[in-house]
Image (cartoon, helix red, strand yellow):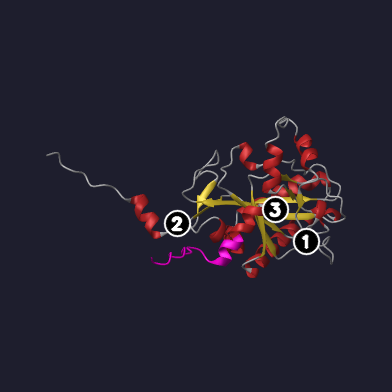
Amino acid sequence: MKEATKTKRFISEEEEKFGTEFAKYGRVICEVADYEALNTIKEFIIQACREYIGPEKCVAGDLLNDTHEFVSVNQLNNFRLRIIEKINSNSDIRLCYFRLAKPYLDIIVGNELAMQARLNLSIQMPGDNSSLLPVHADVWSGDSPYEVVVWLPLVNCSGTKSMFLLPPNQTNQALQRPDGINSDSSEQLFKLISKEVEWIDINYGQVMLFNQNLPHGNRINTTKETRWSINCRFKALFSPYGDKRLGEFFVPITVKPASRIGLNYRYPKMQDE
């Protein structure tokens, strides 16, 4: 009798290990794939900050960590919106953002991708309760479960200066409770899961891909530094969409030639016999 044929691998052991980590923990944290792209993004944002604050006020120091010394909480929303508008008016910044995580997206999501049309920016000052993101999962409000978030810190982040994420096993346990969860109270949900969440420890120069189907959010920043982070969603181009559709919320970015040909193919007209 012939020896049984060994199962062939269609992905490398490294890719399999990477994907297993993402599935187990709901996130992977890696060194950015393109440091030049990272520096371009940070320098662009710092310049935008200087234009808003005024270069004469930006003394030597860490402008991003120390933003609360130059911008008041009352000014924060207008300041953030001004920076976001500048970021999203520059197409090079979106391209740089993609390059930060491209090899990781290839493994986790695929190489034919749709990208969120606009980058999101979070600025969380010490003690500020106006910039909180209560515990939630994006899919609960209409996002497709096929989306992955790329989360980039522009400063070192840990503890309450970061975000929290409930890992997959703990999510399944919490959401399948026989008594259910009061969906009207995100605070109740956080109290239920607070001992199980992972506070993300991530430094500038790293990037995180996480599963937005898992409960996540932030709390009041109790540190003495301001947190800056950018996030953007990616999904496989031909995977199902939720309420946020292609051409509206998402735009295609890496369409392959065979897909372009297939999308444009028209069957010939046949004469009736």
- Give the foreground label among 3 and 1: 1
The answer to which of 66 and 240 lies nearer the viewer is 240
Crowd around label 3: few <14 · some 14–19 · many ≥20 (10 Å): many
Which of the two labelled residues, at mark 3 and mark 2, occupies the earlier sequence position?
3
* Magenta segment boundaries in residue numbering: 1-18
**Residue shown at 62%/68% (left/top)?**
34
Q: Position of residue 254 (x, y in %)?
A: 48, 58
Residue 239 visible: yes
Amino acid type, label 3: Ile
- Viewport quadrant of the N terminus: bottom left
- Please tell me which residue is depicted at 74% across the width and 43% down the height of the picture: 133
Residue 111: x and y in percent read 50, 59
What secondary structure predominates along the stretch shown in magenta? loop
Q: Looking at the picture, which amino acid does disc 1 mark? A: Asn
The quadrant in which residue 65 appears is: bottom right
| Residue 193, quarter of picture | top right
Q: Which mark is residue 255?
A: 2
State the residue position of label 1.
Answer: 156
Going by the numbered disc 2, the residue's amino acid type is Val
Q: CA distance from mark 2 to mark 1?
A: 34 Å
**Cα separation between marks 3 and 1:** 20 Å
Asked if labels 1 and 3 touch by Cβ distance under 8 angstroms, the answer is no
Q: Is residue 102 above or below residue 247?
A: below
SS label for mark 2: loop
One can see residue 96 in this view:
no
Residue at (53% x, 47% y) in the render: 250
The answer to if 21 sits in the magenta stretch is no
Q: Which mark is residue 83?
A: 3
